[in-house]
Amino acid sequence: MKRFILLVIYLFIVMIAFSQSKSGKLIIMHTNDLHSNLTGFSPELEYTPCLVGDDMTRAGFSRIAAIIDEERKINPDNLLLVDAGDFLMGTFFHIFEEDFGFELTLMGKMGYDVVALGNHEFDFGSEKLTKIINTSIINSSGNIPALTLANVEFDDKSEGDDWFKDLYNIGVIRPYHIVEKAGFKIGIFGLIGDDAKQVAPNAAPLKFTDRIKTAKKIVKILINEEKVDLVICLSHCGVSVDKDGNWTGEDVELAKKVKGIDVIVSGHTHTEIFDPIWVGSTAIVQTGAQGKNIGRFELNITNGEISSAKYQLIPVDDKIYGDCQIHQNIAGRIRMIDDTILKPMGLGYYRALAETDYELFCDEQADLDSSNLGPLVADAIWYYVNNFSPVKTDITLIAAGMIRDKIRVGNKGVQTVTDVFRVVSLGEGDDKLPGYPLAQVYLTPREIKNIIEILLVAPKMKPSYYCFYSGVQVYYDETKGLLRKIQKLEIGGKEVDFSKKNKTLYSLTANSYMLEFVGEIKGMTLGLVKVQPKHADGTPVKDNKTTWIDFDLKKDGIQEGKEWMAMVKYLQSFPDLNGNKIPDFPEMYKQPLIRTIPLDINK
């Protein structure tokens, strides 16, 4: 009898446990790296979200909202909508975020449940990010997505991150969120990866902790304490493909080392994943970037386990009839951009700037030697400084990582300032206009040679370090050792002596972010390469702001020049070849212009 009672109790416990194992369907829709692309592109003149079948543009919040709304009609109770970070920074729209908090408000209207913070959210520092979030909360009456970032550490000795820390203390940003969908309890947390934190210097004094250790800790809490049914990581870490064509990268490593994550919604690397990457029982998905796609991951869960999954990368294109109310909201922001920024400069949001019948591109994932856009941007900076500033420059450079988009032909090829800005959109200076200020330092030929020696090998570690030049020709022998590859250097078409005895100074112009890198080369190479940025008179640069070029000495303060302004002026200088009063891109940029030339050792 006693054994019978024990058996009944045991079966009762098993029945309870089985009944608590949940089954059903969950739809995860996701984006990443939207980069303030509220409108579709490009050319942006052709974007018509409230018409279909008339353009080749991609993206746009109006279209994304329509896709989400259609899915929500079909699956009103089991749709989870998330973003894996870098929703800010990339178009003129991000300029007004501190004052209006428009983007998070819009994402709230679109129904986003949880949004992770990426490295570009910190481009203007944690205090400004705090203001953006607070303004968004006020303007939306609290209707913004839940925000998450788990691997952050605050500096108790500094007040610089106190405002941001307050957002954690009151729960606006959290290490993780619990979301209920379709009867499932879902734990969602955000991470910033190792590469992402290296390119977020303005986040200081706050720091980003080890992503693997943090993830293990959070997953343990979610499973053991929160008793969630599903764990999702919004990971701003990314994936890549190795030389053998296999998936690798920080998120693959994360899936291997941290057990218990069911889905990694990846970001940062702008990678289109058309079929989930399965690492054991963990699925990794990513949409690419800029809202050109939205991911739809349908999970069928049986007794608490994913029994089947179906994934689709949905193109956000002209087949989608957009949400015209969302588009109207965005149109008000466009008028603000026009009135505040562009019209005072003699430009217009929808005013033709130049036209092209060929594409210009710079793809970090491809062969950067084949880029025709990188040389054009370098040439534009050279032209702009030498024609519109009180100083002259010998050499200009831009890194591939600073080039954020391509120039597309579309139906008609007509480009506007918005298309140009998307190409070089990063940073800001002190003038409240977007873009890193152009800056200038003076270096000896030996120092220039050594900098380029480092930049020749750096892309092997990170493709974004690949540099494009104007005003200089470099001839190198790949077979030679470190710091001995460059065999000849031409500046302004003339060969220069780069021996130590030549103390002639040449001017080098790049954006302020790039020139800070130049100043740090000595420390980065442990003293192997010695570079001392100088002013025109040969005195060492002690404050990087003193290198910023003042484009109008008659006005108070520094009148900053930007890379996008350089491109505008350069494109305006192109000839009108077909008589329609719109400058045309010249034939010379159809093919890449190689300024670092490998020597043929067999000749």
Image (cartoon, rainbow, N blue to C red):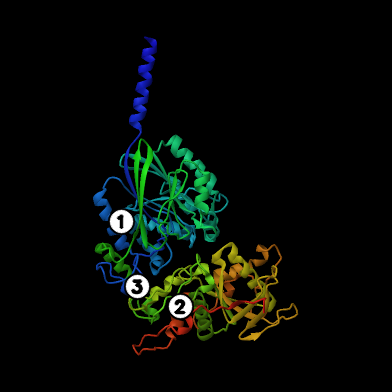
Task: Point out the residue furthest to the top here.
Answer: 1
Q: Which residue is the site of mark 1?
A: 110
Question: 602 or 23, which is in the foreground?
Answer: 602
Callout 3 environment at 10 Å: few (<14), some (14 to 19), or many (20+)?
A: many
User: Marks 2 and 1: in contact by CB < 8 Å?
Assistant: no
Work out which quarter of the rendered image holds the N terminus and state it: top left
Left or right: where 98 falls relative to 539: left
Q: Nearer the viewer, mark 2 or mark 3?
A: 3
Work out which quarter of the rendered image holds the C terminus and state it: bottom right
Question: 3 or 289, which is in the foreground?
Answer: 3
| Amino acid beneath label 3 | Glu
Task: Give the distance between the C-alpha atoms of the residues marked 1 and 2, in whole angstroms.
Answer: 33 Å
For image coordinates 50% across by 45% down, the residue present is 215
For image coordinates 35% across by 29% down, the residue present is 18
| Amino acid beneath label 1 | Met
For image coordinates 31% across by 60% down, the residue present is 64
Earlier-in-chain disc, 2 versus 3: 3
| Amino acid beneath label 2 | Met
Image position of 222 with respect to 363: above or below: above
How far across and down, in percent of the image, does residue 93 sit? 38, 67
Under tag 3, what secondary structure? helix
Q: Which residue is the site of mark 2?
A: 565
For image coordinates 49% across by 79% down, the residue present is 591
How far across and down, in percent of the image, does residue 87 sit? 41, 59
Q: Which residue is the site of mark 3?
A: 44
Q: Nearer the viewer, mark 3 or mark 1?
A: 3
How far across and down, in percent of the image, does residue 161 sit? 51, 54
How far across and down, in percent of the image, does residue 410 sit? 35, 74
User: Marks 1 and 3: in contact by CB < 8 Å?
Assistant: no
Left or right: where 475 falls relative to 85: right
Earlier-in-chain disc, 1 versus 2: 1
Question: Is residue 68 among what the camera can see?
Answer: yes
